[in-house]
Image (cartoon, grey):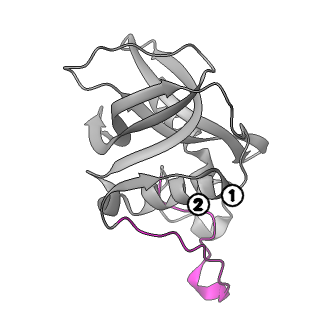
Amino acid sequence: MRKIAILLAACLTLVGCQSNDNANQPTGAGNSSVGDTPASSGAVNEINVQKPTGGVVEIKENMFIAQINDIWLNKEDYIGKIVRYEGMFTQYTWQENNMTYYLVYRNSPGCCGADGQAGFEVAWPESADKTYPNENDWVEAAGVLEQYEEYGQTYLRLSLSSLTVKQERGAEFVSQ
């Protein structure tokens, strides 16, 4: 359960605080987005994010949340694509199964102010040397986006091709 809570916290930006208008919809990562509004409201709040057509999906600082959100909402357009972005590195150990999960993220608005995180779980392929950076190192992560299931839940992660510690840090907190 802790892994689910941790990964959902990492995607908190994607679901944010919801009104009761969405009370009958299923919850979970990627089921609602910044800009989603009930159809009856007539409101339009759309962010245009360029869909991948090949090559590398580069997640930039100025549209970080929008791009992460678009990937979660339209994962079938991105699975199998190479994704590259920068952020802070952290790891969590899920005590129930004694497994460690790795994440590259940025802080973001959340349900209760600035308590959200946006990013992806990252993991080296089985054949790779599994060296990870230090906690809170600023890194550039690149890898193939994949979907996997664990304990009945579906998750996204990057199967890493590179994880490089950078000397210059970007914005640790993003709001777009």
Q: Secondary structure at mark 2?
A: helix
Magenta span main SS: loop
> At x 66% / y 78%, what residue is drawn?
45
Q: Amino acid at mark 2?
A: Ala
Please give the residue where the numbered disc 2 appears in the rendered image: 66
Q: CA distance from mark 1 to mark 2?
A: 6 Å
Residue at figure coordinates x 62%, y 58% from the top left: 63
Q: Residue furthest front?
A: 167
The quadrant holding residue 48 is bottom right
| Position of residue 154 in the picture relative to residue 132 (left or right) | left
Q: Position of residue 123 (x, y in %)?
A: 35, 27
Q: Is residue 40 left or right of residue 70?
A: right
Write down the region rendered in magenta: 30-52
Q: Are the residues flagged by discs 1 and 2 in contact, CB closer than 8 Å?
A: yes
Q: Position of residue 93 (x, y in %)?
A: 47, 14
Residue 143, relative to residue 100: is it above or below? below
Give x and y (percent) for residue 29. Answer: 48, 49
Residue 110 at what x, y percent from top left?
71, 46
Mark 1: secondary structure: loop
The quadrant in which residue 135 appears is top right
- Choose between 22 and 169: the one closer to the eye: 169
Q: Is residue 76 left or right of residue 71?
A: left
Mark 1 / mark 2, whichever is N-terminal? 2
Above/below status of 18 relative to 151: below
Three-letter amino acid code at the position of disc 1 = Gln
Other residues around mark 1 within 10 Å, as few (<14) / some (14–19) / many (≥20) = some
Q: Which residue is mark 1?
A: 176
